[in-house]
Amino acid sequence: MDTWKLEAFVKTVDLGSISRAAIALHLAQSALSQHLSNLETKLSVQLLVRTKQGVEPTAAGRVLYRHAQSIIRGVDNAVQEVKSASDGPGGRVSVGLAPYSLAAALAVPLIEAVRTAAPRIVLHVRENFGGILSEAIATGQMDLGVLYTPVPLRAVHVEPIDRERLYLAANAKAGLAATVSFTALTDVGVFLPSRQHSIRLAVDAAFQQQNLFPRLLGEVESMPTLLELIDRGLGATILPLSAFPALDSHPGVRLHELEDPVAEIGLALCTGSHQPLSEQAVVVEGILKGLLADRASMAKAQALHGN
């Protein structure tokens, strides 16, 4: 199967319109339509449904779209590796990082380290929920990721890195003790990530161990917004220690250890088990492991200093 036809199909799905895809591909609309029709004939399935708004993939089309992305990316990587074989590793490497974590703090250092060690590598760094990133790794759309308690998938290899303790961040004027039990937390209103996030599942599980429920004030995904809410005394939050920056610029925020139970969440390095990492991805993996080892203790020291 011609990879160009796959690229045309992917572009059509991405833009949701044959006419817009034809313009992007510098083709006549009739020529693109013929290419797509030939692809459907070759596969003996309908790949696209025409609507008033444009086109949408069928169930078979979504399957082809997922595989086509992996194939196109593999071809691009192969071309880059062949071209740069004598100049060191090069090409695109995609890395997923869990938000609210030590991993998120690694984005800039990782890019800097890769530029120094292997300047021909182009990094694509993405932050998202663990389930979304796990699926991207499983389908070959992403090379590796640092995720919280990733969703178990047969096509994803999980290498545990560390376990992070969860802490309560509250306004200093709340007058809370240095250590707070989950029973006492039922009187404290909290802002938490949505239930799509592994951290929220860990927090809910800790409450449920005591047959309790959090007094949820809202679901907030932005760390700056959470700190602003706490600064203003509008509520508290529960996150891993490494999620909190040095708190010198947030004097109104205090961190408190949680007990009964002690709540923790696992952090893991995930890669696809369906095929080996490319040469450039192996380089990035090594750099990432080194940064994780160096930054774990540093992040804890900075956060405790801020407290």
Image (cartoon, rainbow, N blue to C red):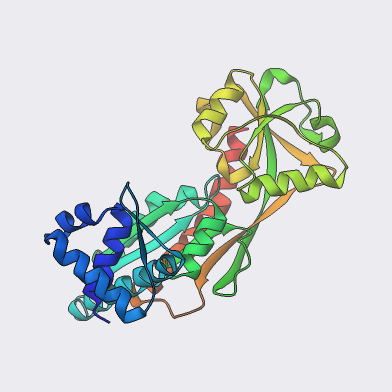
Q: Quadrant of the N terminus?
A: bottom left
Residue 14 seen in render? yes
Compared to residue 82, the image places residue 134 above or below, namely above
Residue 169 location, quadrant = top right
Q: Quadrant of the C terminus?
A: top right
Residue 177 location, x and y as percent?
79, 28
Residue 15 location, x and y as percent?
29, 53
Closer to the camera in the image, 160 or 26? 26
- Seen at 33% across and 61% down, the residue is 114
- Seen at 88% across and 42% down, the residue is 211
Residue reaching furthest to the right: 211
Residue 286 location, quadrant = bottom left
Residue 99 location, x and y as percent?
52, 47
Q: How many marks?
A: 0
Closer to the camera in the image, 229 or 217? 217
Residue 252 location, quadrant = top right
Residue 118 seen in render? no
Compared to residue 159, the image places residue 185 above or below, namely above
Left or right side of 160 for 87: left
Left or right side of 144 for 217: right
- Seen at 42% across and 60% down, the residue is 95
Left or right side of 35 for 232: right
Compared to residue 304, the image places residue 2 above or below, namely below
Residue 259 location, x and y as percent?
81, 42
